[in-house]
Image: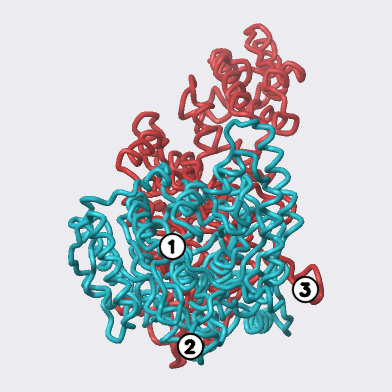
Amino acid sequence: MSNLVEGATGRWEVVIGLEVHAQVISQSKLFSGAATAFGAAANSQVSLVDAGMPGMLPVINEVAVEQAVRSGLGLNAKINTYSVFDRKNYFYADLPQGYQISQYLQPIVGEGVITVDLEDGSSRDIGVERLHLEQDAGKSIHDRHPTKTHVDLNRSGVALMEIVSKPDMRSAEEAGAYVRKVRAILRYLGTCDGNMEEGSMRADVNVSVRHPGDELGTRAEIKNVNSIRFMQQAIHYETSRQIDILEDGGSIDQETRLFDSQTGTTRPMRSKEEAHDYRYFPDPDLLPLEFSDEFVDGIRATLPELPDAKKKRYMAELGLSEHDAQVLVSERDIAVFFEEVATGREAKVAANWVQGDFFALLGKAELEVADSPISAAQLGGLIDLITDGTISGKIAKDVLETMFESGQDASVIVEEKGLKQVSDTGAIEGEIDKVIAANADKVAEFRGGKDKVLGWFVGQIMQATKGKANPQMVNQLLREKLKP
Amino acid sequence: MAELTEIGIAEARDLLSKGEVSSVELTTAHSVAMAEAQSLNAMITETPAQAKAMAAASDARRAQADGGEVGALEGIPLAIKDLFCTNDVLTTAGSHILDGFKPPYESTVTDKLWKAGAVMLGKTNMDEFAMGSSNETSYYGPVHNPWRRQGDGGDNRNLVPGGSSGGSATAVAGRFAMAATATDTGGSIRQPASFTGTVGCKPTYGRCSRWGVVAFASSLDQAGPITRSVRDNAIMLGAMAGYDPKDSTSANKAVPDFEAALTGDVRGLKIGVPKEFVLDGMPVEIEALWQQGIGWLKDAGAEIVDISLPHTKYALPAYYIIAPAEASSNLARYDGVRFGLRVDGSDLTEMYENTRAAGFGAEVRRRVLIGTYVLSAGYYDAYYLKAQKVRRLITQDFRDVYEQVDAILTPSAPSAAFAIGEKSDDPISMYLNDVFTVTANLAGLPGISIPAGLSDEGLPLGLQVLAPAFDEETMYRIAGVLEEAAAFTAQPEKWWRSAS
């Protein structure tokens, strides 16, 4: 598969590197005890430290350190038992200290690698350069007042993990798959909720272009993109913009750009004169962060099964196809749901129901698994009714729809609507006899060798029984009665 | 009974416990003396009403205890350097930019002092953000040293008290605070103590919490006491010190009974005398004082050892890179957005520029510029990183030397107090004031200055004792012996009273 872009001067390759900012799941902020809940009233979760008051000092939150190590392990990365917090200095109204505490030269997590799965079924390894801990800034709100800017410091000091990839991606699709995979891993680990709408995950996207085989081109960095779709749009736009400039004989400025979701374009964030010199230096208020290998091992021992391992197990032990396994492990919530449905049931049947009809209903309602109106136990109950012959698979599809609408158990719906399968031989035989008697021509056709007519007969019986006749029995009895 | 403003903490403690004096009496005496000393400009904020209320509460606690245990500083009236945040009391750091700032919190050190029973008389003047060695950089104007040159036809200009803790040293020397808190980043406790005939100790980095102390240079700042005697100093440090989980650089170590270390016995101790501290052009009287101190310790049975701290000459340049670098970042929060001064502008950037230009004085702006420069891309390695390497070498020098000796004796400052305005146009000559004190900050080690004699012009001169990290006990033990030998009893005339 080629991701190359045709241009007037030949084919171009786009090179993408991502910096994913993931908010750490933690009760309190990185260096203060203030709460981190989303959606709280403005400036209600701000400690004296977060507000940058004189004489206030940061104290590292141990939970955030654990979460970073956990994430590093999930990304198959090297854990650095010695790391250093630095100050990144710049002025802005929502940055009370006048600097952000981050990690610059010595991050808590070093190189790692993750495997991303692409739509054509292939997979690719994408390198992780590092993961470091840093503070979030507050939020400036410019649209509440004609001449003033409001500042909400609730986010100020919230712990973020910045996960920096290597420039290993070659298409918007790969970039999307990478973000999805990182998000899935962090969700499995319980270290970030991955909720891009609430801002708990966002990405800075580095894009450059080159002719294949050339040195890396000059990159532009698109800041703070908050959805995968926007990220992909930004990459497409940025790729054409850069190719156009280069093919016109121009050169790319290394700069920071903003994505405008209204227009789908990017524009420079600040002029060159305003470019920051962040003057990084080790934060003298904090000692270097040191922990033991035992601390890391303790965290390693509590890691859950991650998507890649789970996928292998689904294929090897449950006999699922690679595609089914892939879909079911793609999100932690889906895997948890599936595993509950599959417990004590035929795994393949469970897999088919989960990612077939169930997913179709979710998709139609634009819901995530977590918001599903029916539980895994309820879906399992429906499958049980098929297995024990109470209803047919066909009826089950209708029952599932009703379950989805009402939230009721399958058994209740089957009972109320009288959908129990008719497995009474006498009743089915009676219907068959009626149909045979009324359709002598069709009987003759069948007996003349037209096997297909059997399907027509089955349809008639099912219609007459409102679909409740046990299809296997209908088939069997029909064959017997139609025998010449 | 002596006048109540003439006694120290130890004596007051005895009188209070015997019921011969109340905290209200002690406190009132000091508040009155403070009001009479306004021409010295040692205080930024006086809090006599609060002082009286705290003193009354202290007397009530003492009565409640009925002869039982009370706090280590129960009823003792103190002045607080205006770098310590004090709940709902104006805290300025000597700067215009903190106009009107009343913190809704109390620094850990002052909180510990109040819990130990102490009483706050007010907040002392200081160099702006503790940047200075003469107290002339304060937005609130210079502090006048209680001491004046003696002799006929001499220069009788008013003198600086040293800095940055000039107000604290003056309040203690001028007998209007029994003791005072101070901070020391490059010598800001020890040099003013030397200039005012008081005892000033900078403990080991990490001994006192920095939480709630307005930061100048975080890796160097350390709080300590300025007192009238070594014993008072040991008592007060005991109340200030201790681990604070709110300060990640505070040391999780038990606080020893510093007062108990004053055994008066230094027999067998090895005292190092570093050859690098002999400066070209150092006044003869400083050299003579040093020799005098060496003689006293020898007489007391200590062994004097010539030592070398080879990287000493790089200490001052390294300090004047590291301290401004940290300061340039620490002072970024004074941006006019949330507290203190704001001077409006047409946009955010202009508001920053206007506020910081109006709010910071010349010395602070100079150091912010130096600090910004040495951290900038392309200069970081040559300046900041190099200075950090020097700092490690200096620390290693001390480690090596403390293999051979128990403590080090040096002068506290290269001169006696100088006149107001005498050096304020020459930053380099001003920075040289820190030459003997700054190495202890770079290495994080404890040091104390004690008054040991008078200059030819009748001004106090101090000797400095440096000790290994967290060995303030040895430092106090030696300081106590020097104090006894020096028998420094001179006092400035209270000329400011008649002037008022």
Report the disc number at residue A284: 1
Q: State the separation of the CA atoms marked 3 and 2.
A: 45 Å
What is the x, y in percent for residue B177?
61, 60
What is the x, y in percent for residue A219?
43, 77
What is the x, y in percent for residue B6?
58, 59
Helix, strand or loop at disc 2? loop
Q: Residue at x 65, y 47 (%)?
A: A37
- Position of the C terminus of chain B, as image quadrant, is bottom right
Report the disc number at residue A201: none
Tell me if A7 is positioned left or right of B272 in this view: right
Judged by depth in the image, the label closer to the viewer, 2 or 1, is 2
Give B465 or B434, whichever is nearer the viewer: B465
Q: Residue at x 41, y 57 (%)?
A: B205
Chain for disc number 1:
A
Give above or below for B167 relative to A121. Answer: below
Q: Mark 1 vs mark 3: tell me if same chain.
A: yes
The residue wearing badge 3 is A148
Decide: few, some or many residues near mark 2? Use Cα within 10 Å; few <14, some 14-19, many ≥20: some
Q: State the separation of the CA atoms marked 1 and 3.
A: 34 Å
Amino acid type, residue under disc 3 in the picture: Lys
Q: State the separation of the CA atoms marked 2 and 1.
A: 31 Å
Give above or below for A415 relative to A230. Answer: above
Colour for chain A in the figure? red
The residue wearing badge 2 is B423
Give A105 or B443, whichever is nearer the viewer: B443
- Colour cyan belongs to chain: B
